[in-house]
Amino acid sequence: MKSIRRFLTALGLLGVAFPVFGLEGIQHVSIAHEVTRLIVQLGVIILAAKAAGSVAKRLKLPSLLGEVTAGLVLSPYALGSVALPGFSDGLVPLAVGPFSVSVQLYGFAAVGAVIHILAVGLESDPNLFARMRPRGIAIAVGSSAAALFVGVLVPVVVMGFEIGDRRVLFFAALSVSTSLGVQARIMSSQHRIGTPEGAAIVGSSLLQDGLAIIVLAIAMAVGPIGDASESAVTFTTALPVALIALGVLIGGFILVVVTAPRVARSFRDHGSPTVFAIIAIAITLIVSGVFETFGVAAIIGAYLMGLAFSRTDVADVLEEKIAPVSAFFVPVLYVVMGMLIDFRVLLTPEVLLPGIAFAVLSGGAKIIGAGIPALATGFNRWGALRVGLGTVPRGEIALIIAAVGLAGGFLSPSVFKIMAVMVVFSVAIGSPAIAAAFRNRTVGTRGEWGSIETAVTALDLPSEELTELITAGILRAAEQEGFFVHRLELAETLYRMRRDDLFLSLRRTPRRIEIESAPGDAGIAKTLLYEVVVHVRDRVGRITEVVVPEELRRDVAAGAGKRELALAAYLDESCIVIPLAGQTKEDAIRELVARLDAEGKLLDHDHVLAAVLEREASVSTGMENGIAIPHAKTDGVSQIAVAVGVSREGIEFNSIDEKPAHLVFLIASPIESRGPHLQLLASIATHLRDEDIRSRAVEAQSAQEFIAAIL
C-alpha cells in the first residue's frame, strides 16, 4: 500500500506540475495557490461523489448518475463559481479554453479514464465469448448494426451534419457503446448475471464496446470537420496520419498480447502482486500516452492492456490490487464529466430534444437489433427482451468517448452536451427497465442449451471449523502449485484460482466445499481436494500428541488481567439455578442447558448439549478455586447464552487444583457470532479471582443476591 501511495503522490504531482508550468502568463499565477485549490477540489469531489452515489443507489439508480449530478452541482456554472474564503473566484472557476475546468483537474479525470478502461479490459473474459458463440456474436452484430445506423442517421438528418463529418463517427461510436458497469450492477443484485441472458448481455456488450473503441480510433484519424467540400484536402492530409495510427494500433495490440503473459510470468516468479499492479498501471499510462500521440485514443491503449492481461493467470489478483486506485480516480472522472456540462444549456430545447431523440432512437434500435438475433438463436420472447434492454444503457465508455472528442477539439461544447443528455437519459430509463425485466423469473431460453458444462468436485463435512481448515489447506496448496488465488467479495465465500490456462473456482458453505472446473480439469480438482483432505486428516490425528501446558491452563484459571467485560449484560436472573440438583459434572451441564432451553434461549437443545459435552470431554473446563466454565460454540443458539449454577456441596469437575466446583458458568455461543466469546470466558475468571466475591456468590440465596455478590 505504501508503494501505491507513493505512486499516486508522484503521479499527482506530475499531473499538477506539467499543466501549471505550461500555462501562459505563469508569472501571474501563484503555483502554491493553484496546487492548494486542486487539493481541495479533489477532496470535495470525492466526498460529493460518494454521497451522491449512495443516494443514487438508494433510489435504485446507478451510482454513475449520482456522480455526474454531483458534477453538475459543483460545476463552474453552479456552486463552483461561488466565492469562498481563500478562493474569491470560487473553488471551480470557469476556465478559458476547450474545458470549463482547469487543465490540472481534467488531467486527473483523464488518468481516471485510463485506469477505469484498464479495469474494464481486465474484467473481459475471453472464455465468455467462446461459451456464448455464435449467439453472443450474432446479438452483438445485430445490436451494433442497428445502433450504427441510428448513430449516423441522427447527426445527419436531425442535426444537419455532412455524412463525411468526423463528428458523425463520434455519434456512431457513442451509439454502439454500452455500459458494463450499469448492466453488471443490476444483474448481480438479482443474481442473474450467470443466466444465459446475463452471459449474452455481457459477452455482446464487450464486443460492442470493442467496436465502439475501433470506431473512435477511426474518428480520431480520418475524416474532415465541417463542410464536405474540404473532404479531399483533409483526407489527403489525414491519410498518412491514419496509416500511422493504424500501424500503432495493430503493432500495439500484437505487442501487448505477446508480452503481457511473459510479464505476468516474470512477476509471478519474482515480484509481489502489489508491485506488479503498480508497474502494470505505469505501463498502461505509457502505452496510452503513445497511442494518443500517434492519433489513437489513449483509452484504446488502456483497453488493449487490460484485455491482454485478462488472458493471464494474474488477471484476478491484478484487478483486486488496482481496485483501490480505481476507486479514487473513477469518481473524479465522472464528477469532472458533469462539471463540463452547463446545466442551463442542458435544459434548452436545442440540447435536450436532440439528446433525448438520440437516446430513444438508439435505444430502440439496440432492443430490435439485439432482440431479433436473440430470438433466432434460442432465446424466447422474454429472453430476447432482456437481452435487448440490457444493451440500452450507456455509461463509462460513452462519456469517455464524448470527453475524448471534446478534448481533441473535434466536438463543440454544445455537441458534447447533447451526447451527455443521451447518456444520462439512456441510463435513467434503461436501468429500471432492465431490473423490471429480470424481476420476472420466466425462463428466457428455448431448450437446455443455456446451461454451461462444468464439473463440480464436492466434499460434505461435519463442522464449519473443519470446512475452514480444509479450505485454508486447499488455498495454500494451490498457491504452492503456482496458482494465483483471488477472493471475490460476494454474499457467499468464493475463491478463483488461476494458473496459465487452468481455472478453478472454490465455493465454501458452512459444511460443504465445491471446486468447479472445466470437465477436462476435473482430475486436477479431485487430486487437489484428495491430497489436502489426507494431509489435514493426518495433522488432525496428531493433535492428540499435543499436551496442553499446565502453566497456561493455570494462568487462564487465575483470571490475570483487567475486567474488560460487563458481566451484567450476559446474566439473566431466570437462568441462575440455586442450588444445582445435579451431583455430577454431566448432570450439572444437562440441568443448565435445560434451564436455557426452558427460558427460550436455545434454538436446538440437543445440539447445544452435545457441543458442550464434546468440549468438556476434550479438556476439562474446571478451573481453580471452585469455578467451572463449560462452554462451546454451536449452531444451536442465535446469540450468546449464559446459565449459572451454584452447588454448595461442590461437584467433581477435574479442576486444576483438584477441588470441587461450587460455581458453574455454562456458555453457549453461535458459530458465526462475532460476539465476545473469549472475552466472556476470561472475564468470568477475572471477576471471581477475589475470595470474598466467590464466598458471597456461593452463599447467595437468590439470583438477585448472586448477581449483587459477583458484580
Image (cartoon, rainbow, N blue to C red):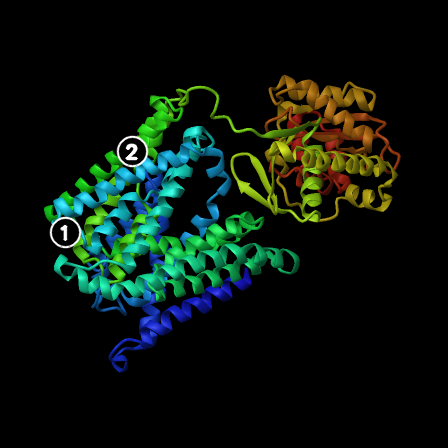
Can you tell which quarter of the image residue 407 is in? bottom left
Where residue 482 is drawn, which disc sits there? none
- Sequence order check, earlier mark of 1 and 2: 1
Left or right of residue 94: residue 528? right
Left or right of residue 258: residue 566? right
Helix, strand or loop at disc 2? Answer: helix
Q: Residue at x 73, y 38 (%)?
A: 693
> Measured from the top left, where is residue 161 in percent x and y?
14, 51
Three-letter amino acid code at disc 2?
Answer: Gly
Q: Is residue 602 above or below residue 338?
A: above
Whether residue 442 is visible:
yes
Work out how far the residue at label 1 is from the one at label 2, CA to CA, in angstroms.
Answer: 25 Å
Say which residue label 1 marks: 161
Can you tell which quarter of the image residue 296 is in? bottom left
Q: Is residue 21 above or below residue 144?
A: below
Q: Is residue 548 above or below residue 513?
A: below
Left or right of residue 235: residue 599? right
Q: Viewer-proximal residue, 158 or 651?
A: 158
Helix, strand or loop at disc 1? Answer: loop
Where residue 369 is drawn, which disc sits there? 2
